[in-house]
Image: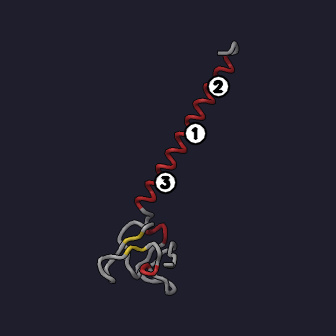
Amino acid sequence: MSENPKFDGRRALLKKAAGLSAAIAAAGVVATQSAKAAGMAQSAVQYQDKPKGGHQCDGCALYVPGSSATANGKCKAVAGSIAPTGWCTLWSPKS
């Protein structure tokens, strides 16, 4: 400890601030990963169950087909049941 108590108080404050910053950053990473795992809300990506401009989910790289060609499937990025003829703003052509 230094002879000046002001410096000791500042050091303690800086250590606490650094620790708090690290905790907040870690919480942000966990929250982001949870959101990715859960999928985005359909409303957030303007999902609709009909095609738009010739683009539809069964032609998208993110679409996971259902049990048949006409059955609803899933999306790697959007939560819920997804129609093969649907569309959203995340549409990306299959390669």
**Secondary element at image label 1:** helix
Which amino acid, by three-letter code, is at mark 2? Arg
| Label 1 Cα crowd, 10 Å radius (few <14 / some 14-19 / many 20+) | few
Distance in Å between CA atoms under marks 1 and 3: 17 Å
Residue 90 drawn above or below residue 19: below
**Of residues 46 and 21, the one drawn nearer to the viewer in this rendering:** 21
Q: Is residue 9 left or right of residue 70?
A: right
Residue 56 rendering spot, x and y as whole percentages = 45, 81
State which quadrant residue 22 falls in: top right
State which quadrant residue 78 falls in: bottom left
Query: Answer yes or no: do the residues labelled 1 and 3 have beta carbons within 8 Å?
Result: no
Look at 43% across and 78% down and name the residue there.
57
Residue 85 is tagged as: none
Q: Which residue is mark 2?
A: 11
User: Which of marks 2 and 3 precedes in the sequence?
Assistant: 2
Residue 21 is tagged as: 1
| Label 2 Cα crowd, 10 Å radius (few <14 / some 14-19 / many 20+) | few
Total marks in image:
3
Distance in Å between CA atoms under marks 3 and 2: 32 Å
Q: Which residue is mark 3?
A: 32
Residue 47 rendering spot, x and y as whole percentages = 45, 74
Q: Residue furthest front?
A: 95
Quadrant (top left, top right, bottom left, bottom right) of the N terminus: top right
Residue 7 rendering spot, x and y as whole percentages = 68, 21
Which amino acid, by three-letter code, is at mark 1? Ser
Residue 5 rendering spot, x and y as whole percentages = 66, 16
Q: Residue furthest top?
A: 3
Distance in Å between CA atoms under marks 2 and 1: 15 Å
